Image (spheres, rainbow, N blue to C red):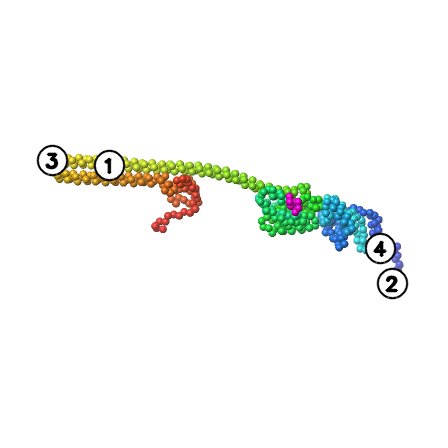
């Protein structure tokens, strides 16, 4: 039964019903009608592409947000089938580069809009990729990496290290038997400087570039005596060199303990290691020139110092010669004073001797005269015999006394002569005596006038020696 007051009427709609599959087919038809032929699409590759077992490559292109930080403005799924991939590889090869999709690349792709009817998924089927456009975007990718790593300090860390003044022990990272290796080693060998090179070979192009370079850096870290490391390779296309625009390489350079010289490509090429390294070289040969010039500059500095040292030593010798001449003059004046003093004493003694001898002779003469008178009187008095004996006795006594006086004076003269001869400085020097003076030229007569580290001048017969007092040993007395 129906409740009272309620009317039920049937509902009819002319809109057809779709199954899921039929709806997807209708949308696919609309897409085909809207995009009847291939179109070009530009976008940035996000995330790492995936390749399935059949060789099909799946990835996404996005329109990034204006600030580069927020979610992308738009996203589209893309697929590059294996059948179309071979043609893309050939197009890149004609441009002189290797095709490899990497996260962050800016692509211009040509293909069709498609809807997978079974899955209801909208995607873009890529038929070709513009290689010239892709290679032109490497500069943009490099700028993004620089802007990302600069605030972190990654690009400045290696530049804050100190380059050794003589970087003779060199680590080398490059491809084995490459032209870059030959050019760099040739540049070092022609310098004639004794460089020692530790080579760590690495792949310098392709997908394994970053990992291989990092392994080479780790290998060099096990060597303890490296001064500087050179990362180098020869020229190539922008895509070839773009393999070095990897932030893992830059971060590795920021962590190593020695300065790194980046010499990748030619003068006009720029890669991320150029920003992260201590110095950038235009070519592998230029990298060698940087090290050779560093050693040559050090040698020039050493030669300049040698000239300065020679001039300083010459001035020191001239100053010492003046001081020696002054000391010789002082010594000569001192010796002259000693000789004059001894001569004066000798003359005084000579005068004293002459005076006393004269006095004694006068006394003896007077006594003799008196005795003669007495003898004469005695003879006259008849005492000639006894007086004769007395006269003989007195004569002998006078002669003995006079002879003793003369011997005494002679001995005193000999002693004075010995003193004068013994005190002659030239004789003392020949016997091994020396004189010691302080830095002011004052004669040092006792160890009490010398302190530890005092500068002293020791004079010999044939020269002098400047010395420094290292140890002082006073003479012990009997009370010690």
Assess whether residue 181 is covered by the magenta stretch.
yes
21 relative to 144, above or below: below
Say whether disc 3 or disc 1 marks the residue closer to the N-terminus.
Answer: 1
Say whether disc 2 or disc 1 marks the residue closer to the N-terminus.
Answer: 2
> Pointer 2: what residue?
3
Q: Nearer the viewer, residue 6 or 191?
A: 191
Q: Which numbered circle lies on residue 290?
A: none
Query: Which quadrant holds residue 467?
Result: top left
Q: Position of residue 32 (x, y in %)?
A: 83, 49
Query: Which quadrant holds residue 159?
Result: top right
Q: Which numbered circle lies on residue 380?
A: 3
Residues marked 3 and 4 touching at CB (< 8 Å): no
Q: Is residue 207 visible?
A: yes
Residues marked 2 and 4 touching at CB (< 8 Å): no
Q: Position of residue 157 (x, y in %)?
A: 62, 47
Residues marked 4 and 1 touching at CB (< 8 Å): no
Q: Tell me the magenta residue range.
A: 177-183
> Pointer 1: what residue?
357
Q: Nearer the viewer, residue 305 or 75?
A: 305
Q: Residue at the bottom extreme? A: 1
2 vs 4, front mark: 4
CA distance separating discs 2 and 1 = 186 Å
| SS at badge 2 | loop
Q: Badge 3, how many Cα within 10 Å: few under 14, some, many 20+?
A: few
> Pointer 4: what residue?
22
């Amino acid at each position: 039964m129906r409740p009272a007051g309620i009317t039920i009427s049937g509902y009819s709609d002319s809109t057809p019903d779709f199954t899921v599959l039929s709806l997807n087919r209708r949308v696919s038809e609309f897409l085909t009608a809207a995009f009847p032929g291939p179109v070009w699409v530009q976008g940035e590759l996000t995330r790492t592409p995936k390749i399935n077992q059949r060789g099909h490559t799946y990835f996404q292109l996005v329109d990034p947000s204006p600030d580069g930080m927020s979610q992308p403005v738009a996203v589209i799924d893309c697929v590059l089938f294996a059948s179309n991939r071979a043609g893309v590889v050939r197009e890149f090869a004609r441009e002189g580069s290797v095709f490899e999709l990497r996260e962050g690349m800016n692509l211009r792709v040509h293909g069709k809009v498609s809807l997978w009817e079974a899955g209801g998924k909208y995607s873009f089927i890529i038929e070709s990729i513009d290689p010239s456009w892709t290679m032109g975007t490497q500069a943009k990718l490099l700028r993004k990496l620089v802007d990302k790593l600069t605030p972190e300090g990654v690009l400045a860390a290696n530049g804050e290290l100190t380059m050794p003044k003589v970087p003779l022990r060199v680590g080398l990272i490059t491809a084995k038997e490459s032209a870059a290796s030959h050019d760099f080693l040739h540049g070092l060998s022609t310098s004639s400087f004794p460089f020692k090179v530790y080579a760590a070979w690495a792949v310098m192009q392709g997908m394994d570039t970053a990992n291989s370079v990092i392994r080479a850096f780790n290998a060099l870290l096990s060597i303890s005596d490296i001064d500087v490391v050179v990362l180098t390779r020869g020229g190539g296309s922008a895509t070839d060199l773009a393999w070095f625009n990897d932030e893992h390489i830059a971060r590795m350079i920021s962590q190593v303990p020695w300065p790194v010289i980046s010499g990748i490509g030619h003068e006009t090429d720029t890669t991320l290691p150029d920003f992260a390294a201590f110095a950038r070289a235009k070519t592998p040969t230029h990298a060698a020139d940087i090290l050779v010039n560093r050693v040559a500059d050090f040698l020039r500095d050493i030669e300049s110092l040698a000239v300065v040292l020679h001039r300083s030593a010459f001035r020191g010798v001239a100053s010492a010669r003046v001081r020696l001449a002054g000391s010789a003059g002082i010594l000569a004046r001192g010796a002259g004073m000693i000789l004059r003093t001894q001569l004066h004493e000798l003359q005084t003694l000579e005068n004293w001797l002459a005076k006393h001898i004269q006095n004694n002779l006068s006394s003896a003469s007077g006594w003799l005269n008196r005795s003669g008178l007495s003898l004469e009187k005695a003879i006259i008095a008849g005492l000639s015999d006894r007086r004769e004996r007395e006269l003989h006795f007195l004569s002998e006594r006078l002669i003995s006394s006079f002879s003793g006086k003369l011997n005494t004076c002679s001995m005193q003269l000999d002693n004075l002569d010995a003193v004068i001869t013994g005190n002659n400085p030239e004789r003392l020097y020949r016997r091994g005596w020396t004189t010691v003076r302080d830095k002011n030229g004052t004669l040092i007569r006792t160890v009490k006038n010398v302190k530890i580290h005092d500068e002293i001048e020791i004079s010999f017969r044939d020269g002098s020696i400047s010395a420094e007092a290292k140890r002082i040993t006073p003479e012990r007395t009997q009370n010690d």
